[in-house]
Image: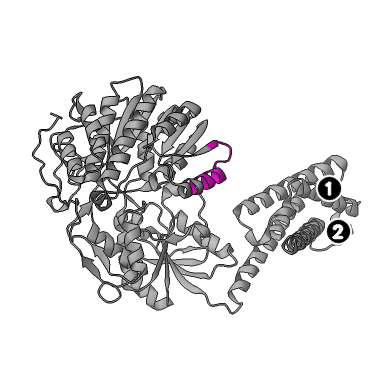
């Protein structure tokens, strides 16, 4: 109750303060409206002696001009602008109001008193005076507020902005407006020579980015802001490297695709992320095709609480489905996801369903109740070493779970089933990869069973996903290290979570059934380089502040991941970042072998033997304990 009363009191005070400001602004405009025309006459005739003017009813004319201006100022809501944020739009409004009021005044006076010889030049002078006083008053107030903020004895952080383009200009303008900002911009650096030795809002463009150290020393700079939304990862790496050498704090604006409103705000500043350094071309989606697939449809996502599943839900909701069903076995995950999605997309029906893909009765019940048009199957166990130690669980979820959801999709006439697979399904050396390859084969077989279109999508590692390497490294850095890397040469393909999920939707719209689609993962990245970049971004020095320790490859791990096996060719699709793999055909007895695999889920050696029969390219790591794997394959 006390908090509620306090909030009401604060709101009353704020309303009173706002009312006072509106009254003062209106009084100022009224004074300008009243004195501008007499001042114009004085300037025109050099005196305020009505005998010199050569016309009668001077007071009437002044009152007419005043009345006209006040009406127009009121109709154009001139006094409602916030003076401390006065800018070009405010100046534009002042020009319109001044011009209209002077023109209307001129028309009224000459229509009313045609015989009177009021000089037209007086109205031109009146326009200049009105404009100067209205605009000058507002901008002078803003100048006083900004200069007063710098003279309050506060310790400001000297800052350089990298990039003197439109983003840098908008950022500087926002920093000058932001009353609570401690950042004091001392200059810009930009490699565009055309911008050198010029000023932006009174701040100089000092020179090229390579001269960073000189200006840091001269102005005692401790903060750098990268304001180049179009910068490539190579350019950002260079800037960050320079800043790290000088022990500077670095922040960045989001990428261009994230600045959707075209306005740069101080709140958008963020630390440079590893995604900025890895850098990939922004994904350009075929929005109409995805919209045709998702809009006004009932969509279901399995594993909806996971890092991929939850982001997939966010991306799907942007296309306004009729209903989104969140299917997830973890109560906490689905609670968090539902809460977030309903806050962002409250107008769309979002249904959380706690259930396990391994339980056929529950899957059948959900599909019969909600009749989804499309299913995105993201539920899976994906941690390689963990699944090596627990292969029976990988079989239950990755194989049996996929088969259950796929079969029930056919039974309940789901239009399209999109399964998310992995690059580890190619020439697998671990149980996780092998089980995902079996899941792909199940989808290939199910394509022949009904009208449901089965589309499989392979991609590599996802930055920041649960259990992935980057959160693991960040935790190690936070606790003081060492940062553990399995091998100095180990490489992986990486993609951001939003990028991966966007391409999942794109691939879903491209697939017609039976395909294995591959995402363009760009260039592979050395995990060792990744660890070193993260340490640098954390402001630490390798060897002095923290160490890197090489632990050796874990069971089932490869040095290099592949997206394609050599015997598979790829074909282009309508999207440049999605290709179709010419996967080998699957024999009809695969499903009986899958049955045997599921039944053998209690014995690790038997599981691996069954996996080799199903996936002949699977070469299990001998250190894990497989005994006899000399068996005949059942696929080509």
Query: What's the residue at 61%, 68% (across, down)?
Result: 146
Label ID, residue 276: none
Question: In this view, which residue lies farthest toward the bottom?
Answer: 153
Q: In this view, does 128 lie to the left or right of 429?
A: right
Residue 610, by quadrant, is top left
Label ID, residue 117: 1
Whichever of callouts 1 and 2 sits on the residue coming sooner in the sequence is 2
Please give the range of residues in magenta. Answer: 336-350
Q: In the rendered view, would you say 142 is above or below 263?
A: below
Q: In the rendered view, would you say 497 is above or below 225?
A: above
> What SS does tag 2 mark?
helix
- Gap between marks 1 and 2, in whole Å? 12 Å
Q: Can residue 318 be seen in this view?
A: no
Q: Is residue 61 left or right of residue 252?
A: right
Label ID, residue 52: 2
> Crowdedness of circle 1 by 10 Å Cα count: few (<14), some, many (20+)?
few
Q: Is residue 413 left or right of residue 526?
A: right
Q: At which x and y percent is residue 635?
A: 15, 30
Q: In the rendered view, would you say 409 is above or below 22?
A: above
Residue 142, by quadrant, is bottom right
């Amino acid at each position: 109750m006390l908090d509620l009363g306090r909030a009401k009191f604060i709101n009353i005070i704020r309303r009173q303060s706002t009312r006072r400001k509106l009254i003062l602004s209106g009084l100022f405009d009224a004074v300008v409206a009243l004195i501008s025309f007499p001042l114009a006459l004085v300037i025109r005739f050099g005196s305020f002696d009505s005998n010199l003017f050569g016309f009668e009813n001077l007071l009437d004319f002044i009152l007419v001009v005043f009345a006209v201006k006040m009406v127009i100022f009121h109709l154009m809501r001139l006094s409602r602008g916030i003076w401390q944020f006065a800018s070009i739009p405010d100046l534009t409004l002042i020009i319109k109001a001044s011009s209209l009021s002077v023109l209307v005044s001129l028309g009224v006076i000459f229509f009313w008193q045609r015989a009177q010889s009021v000089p037209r030049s007086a109205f031109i002078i009146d326009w200049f005076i009105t404009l100067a006083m209205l605009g000058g008053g507002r901008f002078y107030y803003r100048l006083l507020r900004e200069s007063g903020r710098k003279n309050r004895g506060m310790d400001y952080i000297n800052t350089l902005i990298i990039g003197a383009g439109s983003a840098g200009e908008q950022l500087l303008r926002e920093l000058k407006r932001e009353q609570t900002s401690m950042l004091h911009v001392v200059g810009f650096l930009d490699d565009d020579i055309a911008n050198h030795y010029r000023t932006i809002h009174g701040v100089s463009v000092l020179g090229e980015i390579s001269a960073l150290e000189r200006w840091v020393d001269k102005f005692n700079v401790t903060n750098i802001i990268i304001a180049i939304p179009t910068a490539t990862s190579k350019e950002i790496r260079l800037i960050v490297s320079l800043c790290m050498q000088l022990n500077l704090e670095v922040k960045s604006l989001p990428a261009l695709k994230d600045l959707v409103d075209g306005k740069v705000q101080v709140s958008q500043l963020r630390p440079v992320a590893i995604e900025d350094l890895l850098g990939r071309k922004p994904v350009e989606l075929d929005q109409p095709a995805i919209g045709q697939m998702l809009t006004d449809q009932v969509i279901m996502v399995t594993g909806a609480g996971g890092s991929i599943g939850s982001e997939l839900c966010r991306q799907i909701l942007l296309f306004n489905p009729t209903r989104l069903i969140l299917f997830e076995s973890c109560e906490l995950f689905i609670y968090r996801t539902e809460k977030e999605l309903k806050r962002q997309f409250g107008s769309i029906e979002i249904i959380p369903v706690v259930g396990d893909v391994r339980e056929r009765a529950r899957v059948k019940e959900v599909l019969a109740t909600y009749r989804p048009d499309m299913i995105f199957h993201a539920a899976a166990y994906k941690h390689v070493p963990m699944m090596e130690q627990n292969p029976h669980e990988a079989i239950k979820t990755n194989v049996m779970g996929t088969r259950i959801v796929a079969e029930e999709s056919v039974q309940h006439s789901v239009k399209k089933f999109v399964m998310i697979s992995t690059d580890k399904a190619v020439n697998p050396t671990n149980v996780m990869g092998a089980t995902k390859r079996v899941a792909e084969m199940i989808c290939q077989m199910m394509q022949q069973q009904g009208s449901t279109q089965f589309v499989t999508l392979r991609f590599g590692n996802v930055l920041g996903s649960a259990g992935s390497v980057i959160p693991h490294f960040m935790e190690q850095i936070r606790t003081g290290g060492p940062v553990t890397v399995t091998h100095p040469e180990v490489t992986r393909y990486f993609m951001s979570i939003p990028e991966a999920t966007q391409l999942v939707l794109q691939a879903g719209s491209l697939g017609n059934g039976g395909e294995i689609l591959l995402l363009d993962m760009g260039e592979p990245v050395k995990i060792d380089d990744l660890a070193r970049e993260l340490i640098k971004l954390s402001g630490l020095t390798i060897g002095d502040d923290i160490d890197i320790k090489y632990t050796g490859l874990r069971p089932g791990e490869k040095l290099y991941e592949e997206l394609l096996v050599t015997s598979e060719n790829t074909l282009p699709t309508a999207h440049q970042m999605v290709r179709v793999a010419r996967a080998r055909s699957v024999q009809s007895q695969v499903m009986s072998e899958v049955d045997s695999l599921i039944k053998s889920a209690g014995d690790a050696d038997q599981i691996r033997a069954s996996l080799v029969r199903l996936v002949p390219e699977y070469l299990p790591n001998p250190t894990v304990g497989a005994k006899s794997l000399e068996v005949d394959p059942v696929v080509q």
